[in-house]
Amino acid sequence: MLHDLESNWNHLGKVLDIVGDVVEDKDEANPLKFQIQKKLLESKSGELETWSQVP
């Protein structure tokens, strides 16, 4: 589980770098990066809640 989290964070960093490179207007890129981070955190938070409830 921890390895999956680390892997996802590594992928997130790569995605955010790509977004920063592809989106020319940096003022547009930053909110997009924030939305991506927020969605990943929401997703992982739900997984951790489920995982913590497993007997």
Image (spheres, grey):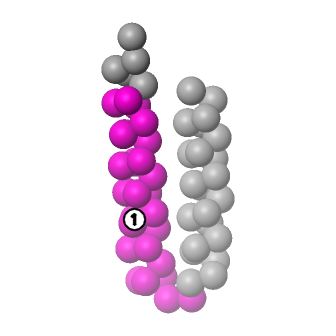
Within the magenta stretch, is there residue 42? Answer: yes
Q: Residue at x 40, y 57 (%)?
A: 39
**Residue 38 appears left or right of 22:** left
Q: Residue at x 59, y 45 (%)?
A: 8
**Residue 25 appears left or right of 3:** left
Q: Residue at x 42, y 47 (%)?
A: 43
The three-letter code of the residue at mark 1 reads Phe
State the image coordinates of residue 6 (x, y, percent, origin top left).
60, 36
Nearest the camera: 31 or 8? 8
Q: Which residue is tagged 1?
A: 34
Q: Which residue, as the protein is rendered here, is positioned at the far bottom?
A: 25
Q: Please, is residue 33 above or below residue 23 in the view?
A: above
The image quadrant of residue 38 is: bottom left
Which contiguous range is marked in magenta? 24-50
Q: Residues within 10 Å of mark 1 (few under 14, many from 20)?
A: few
**Residue 23 appears left or right of 44:** right
State the image coordinates of residue 32 (x, y, percent, origin top left).
44, 73
Nearest the camera: 30 or 43? 43
Q: Residue at x 61, y 63 (%)?
A: 15
